Image (spheres, rainbow, N blue to C red):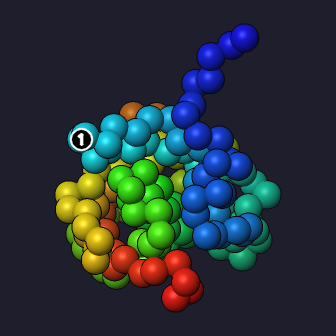
Amino acid sequence: MKERDFIMDSKEVASILPHRYPFLLVDRILHINLEENEILGVKNVTVNEPFFQGHFPGAPIMPGVLLLEALAQTGGILVYKKGYTKKIAVLLNVANAKFRKPVVPGDVLHLHVKGLHISGTGGKIQAKATIGDQLAVQAELSFAMVDKEQL
């Protein structure tokens, strides 16, 4: 039996995040270190993504807001794995966002998230997405914690 090169597949991701197609933007999780508050996710960007139909047809580029959402969702998985299973992290603020490289069909985004502060009321993460060794986007994202029953 071959060892998995990931620790969480798309079904496991979907069991944690409340998002569904077309807004579930994390395909798998490759690494989690709860002591260091770090997680590494993957988003495979395909030409079949629905947003490419209208976001520069003929020269498709993944919208920056969706790049930030993919990072936020990866952070949401980290929050869940830290033990906040009855709450959902809801995006509150985006700071210092910088878009460094366009993301196009065929790219594999590596979603790097480091928890700076995580508590039962909210927190902040430092996040970046890379394509190979090139930085595509970076930002600090703040979130509020909401009871699942409130959504």
Q: Is residue 91 visible?
A: no
Which residue is depicted at the point 38% across and 56% down?
83
Kind of residue indicated by mark 1: Glu
Where is residue 125 shown, x and y percent of the image? 28, 61
Kindly identify the residue that appears in the image at 55 percent across and 34 percent down.
Answer: 7
Farthest-out residue, left: 116
Q: How many marks?
A: 1
7 and 48: which one is in front? 7
Query: Where, by quadrant of the figure, is residue 98 drawn?
Result: bottom left
On the image, the x and y values in percent for residue 108 come to 58, 42
Residue drawn at (29%, 71%) of the image: 120
| Residue 140 versus residue 32 in the image, above or below | below
Q: Secondary structure at mark 1?
A: loop
Residue 46 visible at all: yes
- Residue 106: x and y in percent read 67, 44
Name above or below for residue 53 compared with residue 144: above
Seen in the picture, residue 52 relative to 126 is either above or below; the reply is below
Rendered residue at 47%/63% (across/down): 85
Q: Nearer the viewer, residue 82 or 91?
A: 82
In this rendering, would 148 be left or right of 141? right
**Residue 60 in the image, given as x and y percentages of width and height:** 66, 62
Q: Dot 1 corresponds to which residue?
A: 36
Q: Residues within 10 Å of mark 1 (few under 14, many from 20)?
A: few
Assign the C terminus to one quadrant of the image: bottom right
Q: Nearer the viewer, residue 41 or 100?
A: 41
Q: Quadrant of the N terminus?
A: top right
44 vs 137, left or right, is right
Extreme-top residue of the structure:
1
